Image: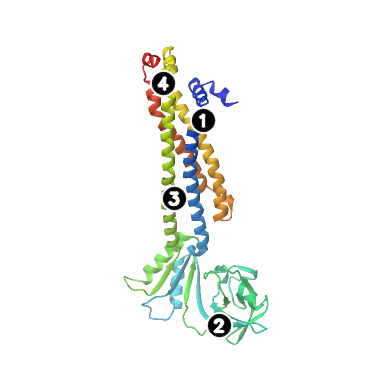
Amino acid sequence: MSITSALWRFPSVQMAWRNLGRNRIRTALATLGIVIGVVAIASLGIAGVALQQQATANLGTLADEVTVTAGEDSTTEGVTEEQVEEIRGLAGDAAVVPKKSNRTTLTSRDGQEARVSVTALTEASALYDVSAGDNPDRLQSGALLTNSTATQLGFELGDPVEYDGRLYRVRGLIESQSGFGGGGNELVLPLSALADQQYYDSVTIVAANGREAQRTADAIEARFNEGDEEVLSVTSFASVQENIDAFLNTLNLALIGIGSISLVVASVAILNVMLMSTIERRGEIGVLRAVGIRRGEVLRMILAEAAFLGVIGGVVGAAVSFAVGLVVFQVLAGDPTLVFGWESIRYLLIGFGFAVFASVLSGLYPAWKAANDPPVEALRG
């Protein structure tokens, strides 16, 4: 069924559709204003979503992690075994990974050297991703080496690396950007490699999500630190993620507000178009009233014209904004399909809804004026 045939069932709507075609240039310009307003609102909103997703991706899994080290008021030079056990009780189902650390120099067969950080732990798979080899849940023997270091020194899986006079076979190669440090030159060994160190240098808790990480951090703070005393220093990136989200949400609102200004300007243009249209057709409207057309029918006709402008401009603006969103997500996130997410689509709906609402609102006064103009005065005019 075509639009025209459907409109025959509603005479006032059909007349409104025909009236828009009388002055197509003026109608196109008014619609263009709506399109620009919708594009401003939806595109800026989608850009904000892309920025938020990029920030979240850059922060990575750090938002789910809590790091615990000895605080300024600690009586020991690190985290004790007893404190680790208490932390396990507070962390619930989250993975608790105590670590000892040091530094050393690795030497290749041809004499090349690389300064690396040494991390001794057991639950390697909780903190690291490997690009090749094994990533054991419990690292009891062998070693993990960052891929960049292995490439620099020519190490392969199964090759021996020496630390403190002992040889360890390379079991896996760590992805350069994985792990709690964000990459770098690192050698991961079993805890036995640093058995001479009495205390743990740090403890990493890997929670299911940022909310659980923050809850665990708060529980550790409450248990070990009273008042201004800092027995354990607790660092949680979940609060950083929350602050970033709060800032970007505020930024999105500001961007939408800026975009709304252009739509308000477009609404004024629609108000002007509708007023001019009713003035030009004053005699025609007077004839309609004289032959028995009710005020409500005239009111609906003018409002339908305004609504048509909003719907057409909203649809075109949403389509243009969607295309802009594909480009924005490709540039910022590298994945244009992310624009199909609800966080982005909702801004298309907001822009479209605002366009229709603003258009109808702009048509209220011209519609009321045309409907209440006395037929005799309208014919005389």
- Looking at the picture, how far across and down is residue 350, in whole percent? 47, 41
Query: In front of the other: label 2 or label 1?
Result: 1
Closest to the camera, between mark 2 and mark 4, is: 4
In primary-sequence order, the first of circles 4 and 3 is 3
Residue 15: image tag? none
**Callout 1 environment at 10 Å: few (<14), some (14 to 19), or many (20+)?**
few
- Callout 2: SS: strand
Mark 2 vs 3, N-terminal side: 2
Query: What amino acid type is highlighted by mark number 4?
Result: Gly
- Alpha carbons under labels 1 and 3: distance apart: 34 Å
Q: Residue at x 42, y 35 (%)?
A: 267
**Circle number at residue 25:** 1
**Amino acid identity at mark 2:** Thr
Is 3 drawn above or below residue 72 in the view shown?
A: above
Task: Give the SS element for disc 3.
Answer: helix
Residue 296: mark in rendering: 4
Quarter of the figure with residue 185: bottom right
Query: Which of 177/218 is in front?
Result: 177
